[in-house]
Amino acid sequence: MKLSFFIRDLELKHTFTIAHQSRDVQDTVIVKLEHEGLYGLGETTTNPFYGMTQENICESLENARDLVENGKWETPQELWELCKSIFEVNPFAQCALDMAAWDIFTKKKGRKLYEYLNLNPKDIPLTNFTIGIDSVEKMVEKMKEVDWPLYKIKLGTPHDMEIIRELRKHTDSPFRIDANCAWTAEQAILFSEELKRLNVEFMEQPLGKDDLEGMKEVYKYSKLPVIADESCIVESDVKKCHGLFHGINVKLVKAGGITPGLRMIAEAKKLGMKTMVGCMTESSVGITAIAHIAPLLDYVDMDGAMLLKKDIARGVVITSDSIVFPDGNGIGAEMVG
């Protein structure tokens, strides 16, 4: 097995702003595994909020090289466990490696990833299209630019309800709102009643991840379901979210890849919670991987490649009424730039 990795910069169509950061370019790292004429690709984007950079991601991957190339493993799960201690401080790097391992493993099996997992692509829920924080005028322009049947609206400003009221004048599409930890419990409960009237489907991570007492109140009194994001990073967080949230949003990049992501989804289902997988503005490498496991989900946010000015890969093609996977086996994404 040969391991290689390289960095790329993903230029966004528009400045993307959420409650705690803005960016015009998303840095990413692509991992490639090669063996006996086959290859697998994986991806992780960087994130300053979590201290994940291209430099420390590549350093972690380099530290795992000997185990990847010379260690005893056959399945992605075995590789994940083999390298777990190396990636304890950098699950973002482990995600890219794990994704590449699933790609090459299922190619060896001669099957697409969703086929190997016995999933039906017809069961994939509609992805939302994300509108980042901006002036109301520009947010409206973004919606008109991409006429979509379901939007996620990023919030976390002093004028959040005014934003939703104004956007609602311009579309009948349902909204999901994501405050990225910016609200208090009192605000979330108060806002939920009007948000429900404004055809909002759910609220994602309204409070800070450590505000457990506040989330108990929101869970009890909110008129809308609440979905955990920052409060549900790794596997052990799933049980902690039970009774505080109605569902979880698993980010493969933050969790450490497809392997733990599948376990988190299964655990949430056992607890009777809704399941969602979200993206981190990946190229079509990461987005195509998400699409393969999307039949497991109640909700999905896999619009990352749609937000790019130029994609560096070719993979799943997502429209408002269809999902078309690449022809090849495995995850099936290919680099184009």
Image (spheres, grey):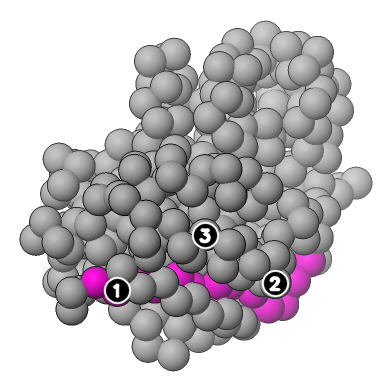
Quickly name the residue at label 3. Answer: 64
Which is nearer the N-term, disc 2 or disc 3?
Answer: 2
Number of other residues with Cα within 10 Å of mark 3, as a class: few under 14, some 14 to 19, many 20 or more: many
* Closer mark to the observer between disc 2 and disc 3: 3
Q: How far apart, in angstroms, are the residues tagged by discs 1 and 2? A: 22 Å
- Place residue 286 in its image quadrant: bottom left
Number of other residues with Cα within 10 Å of mark 1, as a class: few under 14, some 14 to 19, many 20 or more: some
Q: Secondary structure at mark 2?
A: helix
Quadrant the N terminus occupies: bottom left
Q: Secondary structure at mark 1?
A: strand
Between 33 and 293, which is closer to the camera in this rendering? 33
Looking at the image, which residue is at 67% across and 9% down? Answer: 220
Which is nearer the N-term, disc 1 or disc 2?
Answer: 1
Rendered image: mark on residue 55:
2
Looking at the image, which residue is at 58% across and 49% down? Answer: 86
Q: How far apart, in angstroms, are the residues tagged by discs 3 and 1? A: 15 Å
Which is nearer the N-term, disc 3 or disc 1?
Answer: 1
Instruction: Assess whether mark 3 and mark 2 are in contact (beta carbons under 8 angstroms).
Output: no
Against 49, residue 220 (above or below) is above
Q: Is residue 25 magenta?
A: yes
Quickly name the residue at label 1. Answer: 34
The extreme right residue here reads 158
Between 146 and 10, which is closer to the camera in this rendering? 10
Q: Which residues are magenta?
A: 22-35
Quadrant the C terminus occupies: bottom left
The extreme left residue here reads 110
